[in-house]
Amino acid sequence: MIDNFKVIDNFLQFEEGTFYKFELLIRNTDGGNDLYQEGYSKTNKNILIKSWYVDNKDYYEKIKHEMITMANLTGARIYITLDRKDNVKLVQGLLHSYTDSLCAIVKGQKPAIKNLSKTFASETSKEENSSSKFRTIMFDVDTQDEIIKDAVIDYIEMEHVNPKGEVCPKVKAHVLKTKKGYHIFCYRKFNHADWEDKCLEFISNDWNIRDSRDQIISYHEKFTETVSVKANELGLVYHPMKMEETFHDKLYNLVEPYIDGDFVGYNEEEQAFDIVQAVKDILELDTTE
C-alpha cells in the first residue's frame, strides 16, 4: 500500500474561488482493460470511477475517508491534479466549450452526448484553468534510485534564474512515493521549456554523485531513461494493497505462530521463506504431543 496523504495535507492551500481535483482511477497496469470486451478500449490509460472537487479544508478532511474506502473496495488509485484550479477560469472555459456546441447546432449539427458529458471533466483538468500562482511542475521518476531522487530534489530547491536573468523565489520539493519510484513536484515560479535538460546538466556538472567519468555517463543514461518532466500533472495520493497481497498477509498472520526458525516454510530449492510451503509444513506437524 502507498499512502501519500500526509504529503498532500501539507501541500494543499485552499482559497475561496478555487479548488483541487481528486480522481479515483483504475490504471491499465492494474487490469483496467479487463473491464472491457476483448478488442474494445484497449487504448484507455485510465478508467475513472469518481471525481471529487475539493474547495476547503473541512470538506477535504471529511471526504478523505470516503476516498480511501472506495479505493480499498475497488482496488483503484487516488490521484490529485497538482495544479490548483480557478473557478472563474473554469466558468470561462465551460462557456467557450458550450458556445462551440451552440454554434455547431446553429449550423445544423447535433452534438454528441459523449462529448457533452466529457466537457466538465475536461475543463476541470485543463492547465488554462489553473490558478496562476499555483501551477506545478512534476518530475516523474521511474526508479527508486536514491541518488536520482536526491539530485532532482536538490535541483528543484536550488536558486533558479528565469529567462530575464531575475532570481526566482526558492520553492520546496514535495515527494510522493509511487509503485516504481517517485512523483517529485513543486510550484512553477517560471517557465522552462528545457527543465529536463537543465536538471541533467545540474546532475552532470554541479552535483557530486560520481567518482569517475563512467558514473557521469551512467547517470546521464539512467536519468534520460527514468525521468520525465510534466506540467499540470496527476500526482499519486493513495494506492491500495491488491487483493492477492492482502490475502498473502492474512495467510502469513495465520501461520506465523507455527513458524519455528528455518524449518516451517523454508523452501530449500529457492533458499527462502515460502508461504505455501509453510502451510504444507504446518498441516504435516504432529500437534498431539
Image: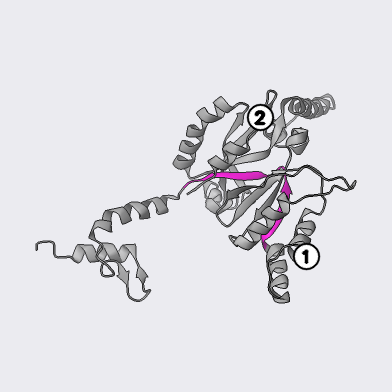
Kindly identify the residue that appears in the image at 54 percent across and 44 percent down. 4
Q: Amino acid at mark 1?
A: Asn
Q: Amino acid at mark 2?
A: Phe
- Which range is magenta? 226-240
Q: Position of residue 3 (x, y in %)?
A: 51, 45
Left or right position of 205 against 138: right
Q: Position of residue 74 (x, y in %)?
A: 47, 42
- First reached walking from the N terminus: tag 2 or tag 1: 2
Left or right position of 55 against 278: right
* Residue position for label 2: 19
Q: Position of residue 68 (x, y in %)?
A: 48, 38
Left or right position of 12 against 161: left
Q: Is residue 106 magenta?
A: no
For disc 1, the neighbor class at 10 Å (few under 14, some 14 to 19, many from 20) is few
Q: Mostly what secondary structure, the magenta segment? A: strand
Residue that extends furthest to the right in the rendered view of this protein:
164
Q: Is residue 234 magenta?
A: yes
**For numbered disc 2, what is the local secondary structure?**
strand
Q: Can the viewer see residue 177?
A: yes
For disc 2, the neighbor class at 10 Å (few under 14, some 14 to 19, many from 20) is many
Does 188 sit above or below residue 112? below
Q: Position of residue 229 (x, y in %)?
A: 72, 52
Q: Can the viewer see residue 37?
A: no
* Residue position for label 1: 205
Left or right position of 214 against 23: right
